[in-house]
Image (cartoon, rainbow, N blue to C red):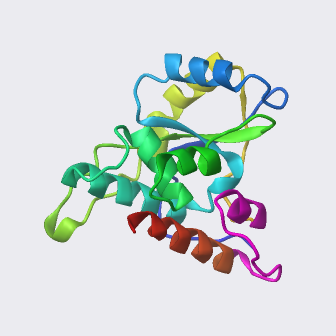
């Protein structure tokens, strides 16, 4: 059963490569060349658990940006670190970044228009996904990857990729999602 949350789709597009990644540097160069700015990020496919996971990570990013507390210099790198649940940038790349042999990934856009309101609340723009869909499609076309019709979902493989090992196999999707969220919060420590 799919997890249903009252949040809009995050601007994230699942993509499939024509064949498993062999030349990671070339792929990253293409991505960086065409992405427009560092609010676009490329993440490993397994590391995203849900829309709530993405929006929660984004909220942590926006809060850190506004306070001047980011550990990384750019939002694309900071989101890798946050998703990975680590304080270390290198570990963020190793866990949440794409690597040789990957067949799928997520291209995400990190909105910067969520303004802080009273008590630190950041507004989520409901049209965030549709506002960036045209740009995402151009980016995938340039990279030669195909958008797949899927949204993030929690998996045991994803837990392992971000560094959570030894979980029980009988966990349901909500429990797996909670582990992702809890793990992400560790990046604050």
Relative placement, left or right, of 126 versus 90 is: left
Percent position of residue 10, x then y: 50, 51
Q: Residue at x 75, y 78 (%)?
A: 167
Numbered label tally = 0
Q: Is residue 159 magenta?
A: yes
Query: Looking at the rendering, in which quadrant would you find the N terminus?
Result: bottom right
Percent position of residue 50, x then y: 60, 62
Percent position of residue 84, x then y: 55, 57
Question: Front-most of 143 and 127?
Answer: 143
Give the residues drawn in magenta, as a range: 156-173
Relative placement, left or right, of 150 versus 13 is: right
Q: Is residue 69 magenta?
A: no
Question: Front-most of 24 and 118?
Answer: 24
Question: Front-most of 157 and 17?
Answer: 157
Q: Residue at x 50, y 27 (%)?
A: 135
Percent position of residue 175, x then y: 66, 80
Question: From the viewer's perspective, is residue 165 above or below residue 139?
Answer: below
Judged from this view, the residue extending furthest toward the left is: 118
């Amino acid at each position: 059963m799919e997890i249903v949350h009252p949040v809009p789709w995050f601007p994230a597009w699942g993509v499939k490569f024509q064949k498993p990644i062999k030349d990671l540097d070339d792929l990253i160069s293409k991505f960086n060349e065409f992405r427009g700015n560092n609010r676009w990020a490329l993440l490993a496919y397994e590391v995203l658990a849900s829309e709530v996971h993405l929006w929660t990570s984004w909220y942590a990013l926006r809060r850190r940006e506004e306070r001047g507390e980011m550990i990384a210099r750019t939002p694309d790198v900071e989101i890798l670190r946050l998703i990975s649940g680590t304080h270390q940038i290198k570990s963020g790349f190793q866990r949440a970044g794409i690597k040789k042999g990957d067949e799928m990934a997520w291209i995400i856009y990190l909105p910067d228009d969520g303004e802080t309101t009273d008590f630190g609340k950041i507004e989520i723009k409901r049209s965030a996904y549709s506002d960036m869909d045209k740009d995402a499609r151009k980016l995938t076309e340039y990279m030669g990857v195909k958008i797949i019709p899927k949204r993030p979902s929690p998996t045991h493989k994803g837990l392992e990729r971000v560094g959570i090992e030894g979980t029980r196999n009988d966990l349901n999707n909500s429990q797996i999602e909670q582990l992702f969220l809890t793990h992400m919060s560790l990046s604050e420590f």
